[in-house]
Image: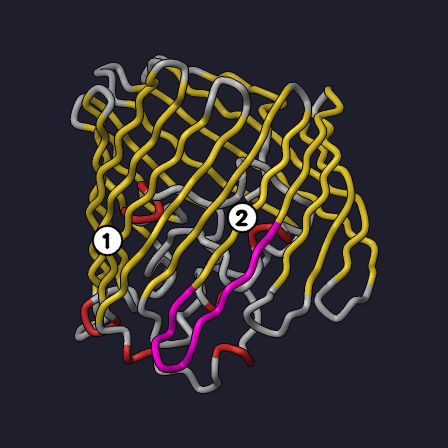
């Protein structure tokens, strides 16, 4: 998602609480966008984020996040909302958050954004979310960290706990360290969705001191035949085909690759994804992103996505991302 920087902080306290803090921040976009049909249109987007946190007298920390934009108007819309508590026992988060695999595996987004997210919404983009979103879209995740190693457990109910529905369970571990000036991150995760199938994934990323970086990630799926596609992969469009939403086919594996470079205000990255649907064929596509930090919370952005394994259409966007 879009990056949002802290803008305004309001502090409040009572005799019964050690401290409470509410931070309000915002993000806006302005530019132009060309969709997969080649139509060029104006683009604007505005988001507001509320982050609340506090600490009890006993040292228990807690907080909540509400992320609002012009589409968050439906009753009971949970998008962008999560609640957490943490302490010596670890951290527990519930709401719109990552399942175990997505928490552990690297995303192929370059750590940057474009105003229409073109570089991370092409058909086979690797977001590492496995079965996230196959249930009621409310994930509960427990995590804890021991030095350079962290692990997580997650669960998502398929249908709000209705009798007979599945619960998607996940477990993951990740390792981060600095090795001679190179930041290294390794991730390993597993999620079981019962009749929906299972997935095991692994990723590795490295950021060199000179600004160059690279990532590779892979997920192997089992028993996802329940998602037999109504149309062959070549006729499918949209990132929900593989990532998020509902799996549109009997996917067997998903590969993601990325190379990036960051120096001062400049950042560029290219990513590639490939998904194997067995006898139904493969889907592959790639994306690119470039950012230039103008200072003061403004970033010039360009993004490109090409669905080369699907419809061969591409899309791009150019504009400014404004954090305040």
**What label sits on residue 155 in the rendered view?**
1
> In this orientation, which residue lies closer to the viewer: 239 or 177?
177
> What's drawn in magenta, residue-wise?
275-287
Left or right of residue 30: residue 187: left
Mark toward the viewer: 1 or 2: 2
Left or right of residue 140: residue 35: right
Of helix, strand and loop, which one carries label 1?
strand
Residue at horizontal 20%, vertical 56%?
A: 169
Task: Please tell me which of labels 1 and 2 falls first in the chain.
Answer: 1
Left or right of residue 190: residue 230: right
Density class for disc 1 (Cα within 10 Å; few <14, some 14-19, many ≥20) is many
Residue at horizontal 51%, vertical 64%?
A: 284
Q: Quadrant of residue 71?
A: bottom right
Rendering colour mode: secondary structure
Query: How far across and how far down the image is residue 249, in percent?
Result: 39, 76
Query: How far across and how far down the image is residue 14, in percent?
Result: 40, 15
Query: Does residue 220 show up magenta in the picture?
Result: no
Of helix, strand and loop, which one carries label 2?
strand
Query: Does residue 279 show up magenta in the picture?
Result: yes
Q: Quadrant of residue 216?
A: top left
**What label sits on residue 28 in the rendered view?**
none
- In the image, is residue 174 above or below residue 34? above
> In this orientation, which residue lies closer to the viewer: 261 or 62?
261
Say which residue label 2 marks. Answer: 271
- In the image, is residue 162 above or below residue 80? below
Quadrant in which the C terminus is drawn: top right
Density class for disc 2 (Cα within 10 Å; few <14, some 14-19, many ≥20) is many
């Amino acid at each position: 998602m879009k990056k949002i920087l802290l803008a305004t902080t309001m502090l409040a306290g009572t005799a019964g609480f050690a401290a409470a803090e509410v931070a309000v921040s915002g993000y806006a976009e302005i530019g132009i966008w060309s969709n997969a049909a080649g139509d060029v249109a104006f683009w604007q987007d505005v988001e507001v984020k509320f982050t609340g946190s506090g600490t009890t007298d006993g040292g228990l920390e807690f907080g909540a996040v509400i992320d609002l934009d012009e589409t968050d108007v439906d009753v009971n819309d949970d998008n962008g909302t999560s609640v957490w508590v943490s302490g010596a026992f670890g951290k527990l988060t519930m709401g719109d958050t990552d399942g175990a695999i997505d928490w552990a595996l690297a995303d192929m987004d370059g750590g940057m954004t474009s105003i229409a997210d073109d570089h991370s919404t092409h058909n086979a983009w690797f977001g590492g979310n496995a079965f996230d979103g196959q249930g009621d879209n409310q994930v509960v995740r427990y995590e804890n960290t021991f030095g350079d190693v962290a692990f997580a457990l997650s669960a998502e109910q398929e249908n709000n706990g209705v009798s007979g529905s599945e619960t998607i369970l996940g477990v993951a571990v990740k390792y981060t360290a600095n090795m001679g000036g190179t930041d290294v991150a390794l991730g390993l995760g597993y999620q079981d969705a019962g009749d929906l199938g299972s997935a095991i994934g692994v990723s590795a990323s490295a950021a060199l001191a000179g600004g160059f970086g690279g990532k590779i990630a892979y997920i192997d799926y089992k028993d996802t035949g329940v998602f037999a596609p109504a149309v062959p992969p070549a006729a499918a469009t949209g990132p929900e085909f593989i990532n998020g939403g509902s799996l549109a086919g009997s996917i067997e594996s998903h590969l993601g690759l990325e190379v990036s470079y960051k120096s001062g205000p400049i950042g560029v990255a290219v990513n590639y994804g490939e998904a194997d649907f067995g006898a139904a064929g493969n889907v592959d596509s790639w994306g690119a992103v470039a950012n230039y930090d103008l200072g003061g919370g403004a970033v010039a952005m360009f993004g490109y996505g090409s669905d080369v394994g699907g419809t061969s259409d591409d899309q791009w966007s150019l504009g400014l991302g404004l954090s305040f």
